Image (spheres, coloured by chain):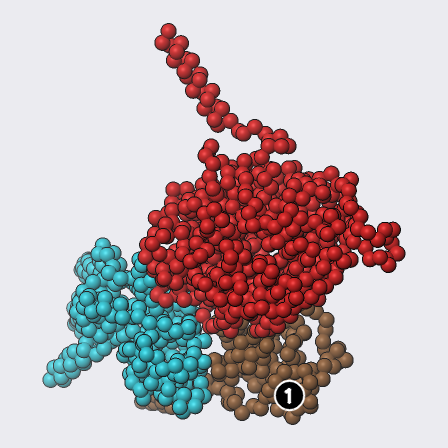
Amino acid sequence: MRSLFGAVGLAFAWASSAIAQAPPPAPSAHTSYSGASATFDGAGKRGEWTSQARDYANTRYSPLNQINAGNVATLKIAWTFSDGTQYGHEGAPLVVGDTMYLVTPYPNIAYALDLTKPSPSIKWSFQPNPSPTAIGKACCDAVLRGWAYADGKLIYNLLDAHTVAVDAQTGKELWRAKMDDVDKGVTMTMSAFAADGKVFVGNSGGEMGVNGWLAALDIGTGKELWRAHAVGPDKDVLIGQGFNPFYPWMKGKDLGVTTWPADMWHTGAGSSWGFISYDPEQKLVFYGTSNPGPRVPAQRPGDNLWTSAMFARDPATGQAKWAYQFTPHDQWDYDGINEAVLLDMPIDGKMQKTLVHFDRNTYAYTIDRTNGEVLVAKNFAYQNWSTGFDMKTGRPIVDPALEPKPGVKLDRVCPPDIGQKDWEPPAFSPNTGLLYVGVFNICMGLTDHEVSYIPGTPYDGMEMQRFSVDGKDGNWGGFIAWDPAHGKKVWEIPEKFMVMSGAIATAGDLVFYGTTDGWFRAADAWTGKILWSQKLGSGVIGQPITYTGPDGRQYVAVATGVGGAAMVQKSRAGFPPRGNTLYVFSLNGDAIQAPESPSSGSTAPATATPQ
Amino acid sequence: MKRAVAGLFSLLMLSNCARAPLGYLDGAGPAARSIASLGWGLLGISVAVCLITGALLVFSIFRRRSQTDGLGGGDDRSALRWIGVGLSITTVLLLASAVWTLWTVRGLSDTSRAAAVTIDVTGQQWWWEVRYRSDTPSREFSTANDLVIPAGVPVQLNLRSRDVVHSFWVPKLAGKMDMIPGQTNRIRIEADRPGIYRGQCSEFCGMQHAQMAFFVIALAPADFQTWWNHQLEPARSDPDAAAQQTFMEHCAACHAIRGLSAGGILGPNLSHFGSRRTIAAGILPNDSRNIALWLRDSQGVKPGSKMPELHLAANEVDTLTAYLEGLK
Amino acid sequence: MKLARLILGGILIAAIAAGVTGWILASQNAYSHLMGAGYDSTSTMLPLGDVAGQSASTPPADVANPASSDPNAVAEGHKLFISMNCAGCHGYDAKGGMGPDLTDTYWRYGGTPTQIYQSIASGRPKGMPSWGKKLPARSIWQLTAYIQSLGGSFPANAYQAAVQGDLADKGQNKGASDQQ
């Protein structure tokens, strides 16, 4: 009798453990892979795209489905707009009401386009005339990664380290704040971010030995409310009583000083040049910091806090709530600035408030956004600098053979300094529960040279050659779908050139992305099958958007104009020339036509009917 | 009579040599003393061998041939015995020398006592970069040409070179160790007492090899900690802005001073320069006249050195001299 | 053996004499080579201002690089190129990055030796720092020599042509495959 009970009990235990360990059932077309969800707070109306990431959580997800997997094959160019500038185009145009706002790379001219008229129709333009000195101080092209709309104002950063606010109706300058000194090598390229009644801006210059910071400005006046540095004593970094990092090695006094050789934190960088997310419920802003300076690790032993890290701060005071350093004592320029996508998802059966962050060091992190604990850390692409991740200490395990020493060449370090994902942001689909992001597939040969700090010159020292992972000019990029709850890649589209564009996901089960050699593609969000492609005039490193025009049609827009870090490919056959054209697509290329246009039949805007 | 004078003379010479700054016969540290005693010992053995051999040679030259010798040689067995004796004495003495030498050398690299401090010394044409290591990164800093160590405890030196082969030699404290580019050599030095000991580059390294000296300053351990803490302090707190500006304009591309945004690593770190004993790697005493001389005419003082002719105006020289002197 | 003694004595005296003579000669001339070829004077008159719209200038602007007679100038210039962080902006291969390509024949501000010198010494509007006070003239000429050795620069006597913009006429401004 007892043995029968025992046998049944054993069988039961075996069965339940088998069930617990069984792989999750293959998702049908309607089951989310990860079970992740997001709030879309901060998004404008359904048909608008009012901020770079569309919402505070940075989902880049649009509820529009007029264009969907069924009809996207009929997508055609509706209209184009050339902005006359030369550098890489990285920002997403904004659509607020019936107006589209966009800002060019240097010289940062702002345009407002009236979407009610046959486009493009320029409502106003604004020329801020930033200082040309900034061109020679920007490490990675004279770009601008986005702009913000808030309170009837268009607010954006100028390359020469100023922030400017322009009246969205008239195009007149309302205020301009000098944020830092371009002669010292400081530029600003990141997108201003508006939330909680303030606008948040940060500097660039991780290669120039700057002192990195994030600041909050008053939207009405541009007055600086607080500034949090990434290096230096706690009073500069705004670390106080409320600071509670999850891991013990980030607890201590003045770690932004003691983890550097004497006085080297002054030129320690940690600039904030990526995108910012905001959790209105917890009242926290999340953002990352750049690599440490100089880029030669032998000159700065120590963990080099708070570089290559992420901060969660109180937007009202700037005080840090928690922080997490992705790559302690970074040795390969793995900035921590990549965005945090704020999602709620079940981890090990428990619903958690998390953020998902694809780091330059090739780990995709799912982190508890209430306290900074790492829940998942898995590689989303190929890397060889780390042999694993220690979940107990929250630190990656470095392979000592890949640590650079000055004067000694490392033949193959993967990923290179720009990572397997740079600043290009991912998109989230609540339907599939997946994140979609453009990636690279490259490695570098690296020789470090010891460097002097000479203000206004690079504090750099990395001599590099970049090549594809297989070393034979193979695929340099790809576009992947990632399950953040399980840390798994679900599908991947390999690409010959780097994919450095932003991604968007729509309710039509589509994801859009562009390649650096000029392809703009739509893929099925579930399967990764490419449903539509178009070759554009220049490479795409910008962020696409989708919006509803005044005519009720859904449009997809993306700027072309290769530049930025994609220029590492410039000697490859097929690499496109520079450009500056915004492309707007619609089904059949339909758009508002001019009355005198001979090719149109009717003068009234047609109501769009899905096919 | 002549011999006595010669002996006295050489004794006097040796004792002078011993007192001279580079006199290695008078060691001030355990390593130097063991090397010196090994040197004396080997000298003694060598002299004894020379004397014995010389005496035997003289004896064999002037020995009268015995009448019975014919065309052939003498008594073979007796000759063989002499050879045997010679061989055995030689073997014993050589073995003894070898063992003693190996024992001394092994003692030099003895790491059983923990080093009180680790210092990276990097030789480059023609000065010495000195970088103090620490478990706390913020206590690490660089200085140049003056190597300050705590007395009475072993100090670990990691020796490197940025260009050609140099050699690190502080005769009163330790033996020579080469500094080879691309390689790190390690040596331990220890000074018994606080004091100042001169060092010299001892591997020909170019034009100014002869003027590549440095000083090891041994301080009592408590004084050493005080000195270390002082080095971590930034440049003096009441800076003359114009002087700083002049320094930044003309000097900061190659020289660094903690506390300023001067971060050049091509030349010596000038933090707390005013408290150093010498300029230009030990060749000029550090006073205002010599600072001005160095700024005006570095190529005249040390031709071929990497410090260029700056063509500064007279008032700039004065400003910089006063500023550098004040960096105590 | 008087002859042998004579010969030995003669050789000894000759050796001593040679040594003394050599010592005297060496100590006199030892460092004269190091004092520089005299090109560290700042008296070279260089035109100020940008290239565009320059009227014909006087001959000193056609000055060749005085460091061209120094066989070490290119090597020293290369070392400075790295240690002064030029490589950080212009690339370790000088093919450009944050700053322009220095190996091609396209020059924003002119590619003759004096124009290159002026760019380095006074800085340029799009972020090129000014090195005139930080480096002595000799070092800047060495840097210029290094840049000239990369193959894209123009000879000194092309200064007027460069200023008047007619280098294409002389077939000297070869198109580059990437001018960004």
Q: Quadrant of the N terminus of chain A?
A: top left
Q: Estimate the x, y position of residue A474 in percent, counting from the top left.
A: 64, 49
Task: Tell me the quarter of the picture where residue C95 sits.
Answer: bottom right
Q: What percent of the width, then of the height, locates residue A357? A: 51, 48
Task: Name the image quarter holding the C terminus of chain A.
Answer: top right
Chain letter for the red colouring in the rendering: A
Q: Chain of mark 1?
A: C
Tell me the residue at 37%/77% (across/down). B209
**Closer to the camera in the image, A458 or C145:** A458
Where is mark 1, residue-wise?
C62
Q: Secondary structure at mark 1?
A: helix
Q: Nearer the viewer, residue A248 or B97?
A: A248
Q: Is residue A222 visible?
A: yes
Q: Where residue A17 sits: x, y (%)? A: 45, 24
Please state which of residues A602 and C2 is positioned toward the viewer in this rendering: A602
Would you say A387 lies left or right of A67 here? left
Residue name at image x 43 percent, y 20 percent:
A13
What colour is chain C? Answer: brown
Viewer-closest of C32 and B150: B150
Judge whether A152 appears above or below A490 on screen.
below
x then y, percent, for residue A86:
67, 66
Q: Which chain is cyan?
A: B
Position of residue B142 in the picture relative to residue A575 (left or right): left
